[in-house]
Image (tube, helix red, strand yellow):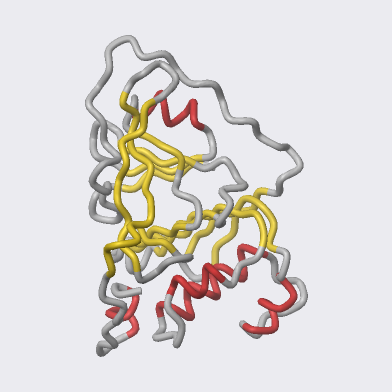
Amino acid sequence: MLAVFDQTVAKCPEGLRSPPAAGAAAGASANKNPLVPRMFGSVNDIFCLFQGHVENIGNLKQHYGLSKTANEVTILIEAYRTLRDRGPLPASQVVRDLSGRFAFILYDTVSKSTFVAADADGSIPFFWGVDSEDHLVFSDDNELLKAGCGNSFAPFPKGCFYTTSGGLQSFEHPLNELKAVPRVDSQGQMCGSTFKVDSEAKKDSGIPRVGSAADWSNHF
């Protein structure tokens, strides 16, 4: 699983980029379970990469009015469309409603928006980083991130989601800000940051409802 976005779609959060370290060794590749399903699909210019398994898929099919043949990718695309088109729930609630082990990357080619998330336990190996041209990169392969981003990469924060307009947010604690904590790898080198919920810092929970579906997608 690999996605690369330029700055117009996904800006690098502060703290993820680290100064280059000469002679840093590549880290060990994360264990990949061949039994973990990987899926890809698209609907009306919305593309989705999904890895893992959603346990409450039956309830979600019913909630979004989908057919019995719908899979996780179909559900995520429909959930995104609901959010984009003035849906009643915040994005944090939509991700929190997913029960299971998962990581996904969704991209809307019309609004140039991305929606990325990982489950609350970080069950699926999933990483992000920033390359030398300031592209934000997502992948399940840490060696690939190490090669492309040097030491400016880290595990994607568990229990979090990333959107083009809202940046990185916690779906478990949506009213709290996140703070970057510098990460040191096994070689003692600075290597991106982990992002933790700041229990002391609250943010505005209001989502402005504006005039069009396109505008609404820029606020979810």
The number of callouts visible is 0
Residue visible at 46% across and 82% down in the picture: 89
Residue visible at 42% across and 78% down in the picture: 90
In the displayed structure, would residue 67 be above or below residue 185?
below
- Image location (x, y in percent) of residue 62: 70, 83
The C terminus lies in quadrant? bottom left
* Residue toward you, 169 or 110: 169
In the displayed structure, would residue 51 be above or below residue 211?
above
Left or right side of 126 for 163: left
In the displayed structure, would residue 3 be above or below residue 29?
below
Residue visible at 39% across and 69% down in the picture: 174
Residue visible at 42% across and 13% down in the picture: 25
- Image location (x, y in percent) of residue 159: 50, 57
Left or right side of 67 for 84: left
Q: Quadrant of residue 19?
A: top left
- Image location (x, y in percent) of residue 115: 42, 61
In the displayed structure, would residue 25 be above or below residue 146?
above
Left or right side of 220 for 186: right
